[in-house]
Image: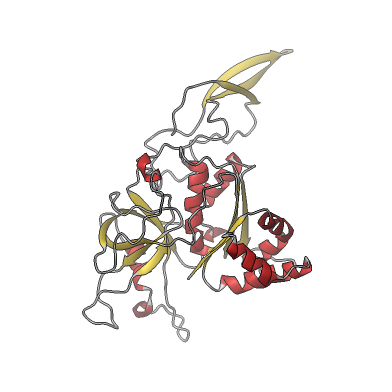
Amino acid sequence: MAQSTFSQVAVAVPVGSDLSLKRSVFKINSLNFHDKSWSPVTALNLKLRGNRAIGWQTVCMSVQQASAPKVSIAPLDLEDAKEPPLNLYKPKEPYTATIVSVERLVGPKAPGETCHIVIDHGGNVPYWEGQSYGVIPPGENPKKPGSPHNVRLYSIASTRFGDSFDGKTASLCVRRAVYYDPETGKEDPSKNGVCSNFLCNSKPGDKVQITGPSGKIMLLPEDDPNATHIMIATGTGVAPFRGYLRRMFMESVPTFKFGGLAWLFLGVANTDSLLYDDEFSKYLKDYPDNFRYDRALSREQKNKSGGKMYVQDKIEEYSDEIFKLLDGGAHIYFCGLKGMMPGIQDTLKKVAEQRGEKWEEKLSQLKKNKQWHVEVY
């Protein structure tokens, strides 16, 4: 946690009220905060009103931390580079990294399994938020006997400082690709995704071949710390946005003090399929003026026509506001399966026409202004 001179601010609140001053809403087993508590110091004062003793809690915290405490990061020289690192390790000479942890992210009612995988690169494969790593699974390519498997790209789900805030790890958000025979309905392991199953089955200490980092289209523009960033994700496409949001709201980054608006739209099947929901909910509580979070749960919610609620339906719901923000220079990002884009594009085109605008012209202008960022797979 970032340390600072302790200037006390006393806030009196009734003991009976729900302060929700928990040590952390994050899963303790998946994040190491070096045993530094996130909770403000509390003291109990008793005041008398008439014949009644009323309990009040005095919450003491530093002025700097009055909104929410942030975590110290290192090494700070990761902030010095003017250009993002690119392709430091290539497929013919990958870097051998080590698996730190593999954690299932979704609940029992989620269709399929998604895992959070932390990889130790020893500080040797630095990256920026929004970039990807390549992973080469072990074994040989069945289409090219004697050759290694092709590289699979995964968006990095952590900031450049990693989940341990020391610049030595990177995290991936991976959905296990499983194939079911359409006739028997049974799983056919021979057709399962080679790389996703290798990663989700990994154990701490296992070695993993990585390449990269790669990609520039999804880099977070930081020239204006008060800019608006609208992030639209389906499933594991939330990975780069987790990195953005940790940088904005969790880490104490001396060179980047975010004061703008971050608005995340996340589309998944149901509540059990939500990814990193505890983290995002905490930002919503701690930074209500700077963060908005809308979920589209296709199997639990209905859109205005009574059909399933997809992420494009949420966009349509807030379309007026989104278009005004885009007109004001907001950045908009899309990440997830490529099948998400046609529906989203159709929705944006329909909304533009309702507003008397030509979508093709507007899209062209957004791309020209570098406000439009798409990474689908």
Q: From the top left corner, tell me how far across and down residue 359 is, in percent.
A: 69, 70
**Viewed as shown, does residue 116 lie left or right of 296?**
left
**Viewed as shown, does residue 107 lie left or right of 142?**
right
284 and 53: which is toward the camera: 284
Q: From the top left corner, tell me how far across and down residue 238 is, in percent.
A: 51, 59
Q: How is the image coloured?
A: secondary structure
Q: Report if residue 232 is visible in the image.
A: no
45 and 96: which is toward the camera: 96
355 and 8: which is toward the camera: 355
Residue sitting at 48 percent across and 47 percent down?
A: 246
Q: Quadrant of the N terminus?
A: top left
**Viewed as shown, does residue 69 lie left or right of 320?**
left
Q: Residue furthest bottom?
A: 183
Q: From the top left corner, tell me how far across and down residue 272 is, in percent.
A: 54, 59
Q: Report if residue 166 is visible in the image.
A: yes
Q: Residue furthest left?
A: 146
Up-down relation of residue 31 to residue 218 (above or below): above
Q: From the top left corner, tell me how far across and down residue 160 is, in percent.
A: 40, 49
Residue sitting at 39 percent across and 67 percent down?
A: 153
Number of dots carrying numbers: 0
